[in-house]
């Protein structure tokens, strides 16, 4: 079991029983997401014919959409969103209950965590919605992504308004 740090500033949130997470890498940076939030993992090569180009200028981290099971997913390049070094992502994580899919470089491992620590106050703005908190794996602190915080409802509405008519029918109402 992972125990919280000794600092009085460190406050753990969530459940204490271990929960499965997927630890992945983007531009050499480890990140994690609760495993239950991931519907499917696919290679980018296997989706080449399914992705539709979509380049809204105000969202440079989105360049494609992919329809899965009747729902349109905006493909989010996490490296661009987080201003990391350019890479060639090899995997797409389709998220459960969210209208986005995440481009990642590789899956590092499956793991289990017991604690997610609250974000420090230094995290301001959008990153407060992007992350659930920070997880501790051995000697590494890893940000835990919030599947529903990557694209806000307002951003999803803006994106839906810019969709070509051929794709508009796959956006949930």
Image: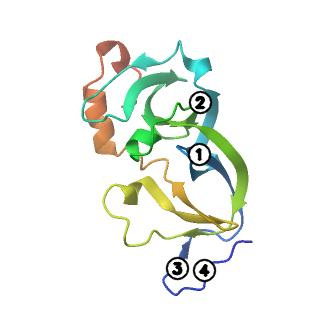
Q: Which residue is mark 4?
A: 5
Q: Earlier in the sequence, mark 1 or mark 4?
A: 4
Q: Nearer the viewer, mark 3 or mark 1?
A: 1
Instruction: Looking at the image, tell me whether mark 4 or mark 3 is earlier in sequence order.
Output: 4
Residue under pointer 1: 25
Instruction: Please provide percent x and percent y for residue 1.
Output: 74, 71
Query: Which residue matches tag 3?
Result: 10
Does label 3 or label 2 sit earlier along the sequence? 3
Residue 113 position within the rendered picture, expressed as x and y whole percent measured from the top left: 68, 63
Question: Which callout, 4 or 2, points at the residue further toward the start of the chain?
Answer: 4
Label 2 sits on residue: 90
Question: In whole angstroms, how far apart are the C-alphas of marks 4 and 3?
Answer: 6 Å
Front disc: 3 or 2: 2
Q: Disc 3 and disc 2: Cα gap in Å?
A: 35 Å
Q: Looking at the image, can residue 26 be seen?
A: yes
Spatial CA span between label 1 and label 4: 24 Å
């Amino acid at each position: 079991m992972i125990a919280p740090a000794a600092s009085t500033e460190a406050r753990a949130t969530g459940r204490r029983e271990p929960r499965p997470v997927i630890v992945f890498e983007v531009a050499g940076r480890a990140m994690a997401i609760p495993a239950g939030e991931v519907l499917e993992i696919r290679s980018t090569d296997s989706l080449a014919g399914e992705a539709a180009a979509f380049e809204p200028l105000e969202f440079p981290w989105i360049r494609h959409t992919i329809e899965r099971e009747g729902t349109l997913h905006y493909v989010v390049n996490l490296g661009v969103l987080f201003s990391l070094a350019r890479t060639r992502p090899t995997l797409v994580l389709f998220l459960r209950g969210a209208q986005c899919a995440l481009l990642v470089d590789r899956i590092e491992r499956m793991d289990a965590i017991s604690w997610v620590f609250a974000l420090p106050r230094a995290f301001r703005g959008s990153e407060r919605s992007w992350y659930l908190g920070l997880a501790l794996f051995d000697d590494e602190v890893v940000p835990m992504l919030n599947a529903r915080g990557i694209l806000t409802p307002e951003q999803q509405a803006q994106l839906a308004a810019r969709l070509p008519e051929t794709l508009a029918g796959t956006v949930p109402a």
